[in-house]
Amino acid sequence: MFLLIIVIYFSMIKVLNSCIPTQNIETTTTTTTVATTTTTAFACSTCSNIYNTGCQGTGLPSASNWCVKEEDVPVQYSVESASFYVDYEFLTDEMACTTTLSCPSGTHSVFLVSGYEEEGENYGLDPTTLYCPESGTSAGRWTSYLNGHEANGITRMTCKNN
């Protein structure tokens, strides 16, 4: 009898070791997106950043009166050799801080010129390039050619709702 128990015991161990239960394993892939903001150093030394810092974004402060935040435009500045008008004088190959304001769909460009708001090119729908001399008598003053006339002393640019 003892021999029979030992045979059954070893037989069961053999069977248990040889049976590996299988499982259905589901693999899942999780993708995580992380939003990043890249800040570029302001390239100009004499001229200031003139995009409207008071903008709160779409629908703020109200649905009928809002402007786009600078990081959503985006506004880029560069220093380069340019030719442009300042105080009715055409400057050629002047080192200037330049930016081109191209507003997102549903908005238009508006510039604060000598205390008055003025729309950009083609009612503010076309891109508008601004220049600011880095040296000379007009250094630090933003200027552009808006709707057929010279606009000097631009102190703010904004992308406003239509």
Image (cartoon, grey):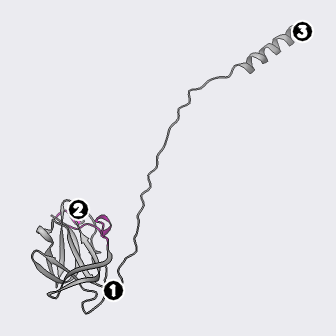
Where residue 7 appears, as percent x and y from the top left, is 84, 11
* Distance from Cα at disc 3 to Cα at disc 2: 89 Å
Q: Residues within 10 Å of mark 3 (few under 14, many from 20)?
A: few
> What amino acid type should be assigned to the residue bearing mark 3?
Leu
Where residue 59 appears, as percent x and y from the top left, is 23, 62
The tag earlier along the polypeptide, 3 or 2, is 3
Asked if marks 2 and 1 touch (Cβ < 8 Å), the reply is no
Asked if marks 3 and 2 touch (Cβ < 8 Å), the reply is no
Which of discs 3 and 1 lies nearer the camera? The answer is: 1
Per the image, the residue denoted by label 3 is 3
- Residue in the image at 23% along x and 76% along y: 130
Q: Secondary structure at mark 1?
A: loop
- Residue in the image at 15% along x and 65% along y: 125
- Is 140 in the magenta? no
- Is 75 in the magenta? yes
> What amino acid type should be assigned to the residue bearing mark 2?
Pro
* Distance from Cα at disc 3 to Cα at disc 1: 101 Å
Q: Residues within 10 Å of mark 2 (few under 14, many from 20)?
A: some
* Distance from Cα at disc 2 to Cα at disc 1: 28 Å
Q: Quadrant of residue 35?
A: bottom left
The magenta-colored residue range is 61-76
Which of the labelled discs sits on residue 46, or is there none?
A: 1
Per the image, the residue denoted by label 2 is 104
Q: Quadrant of the N terminus?
A: top right
Where residue 60 appears, as percent x and y from the top left, is 24, 65
* Residue 67 sits above or below residue 4 on the image: below
Q: Residues within 10 Å of mark 1 (few under 14, many from 20)?
A: some
> What amino acid type should be assigned to the residue bearing mark 1?
Thr
The tag earlier along the polypeptide, 3 or 1, is 3
Which of the labelled discs sits on residue 94, or is there none?
A: none
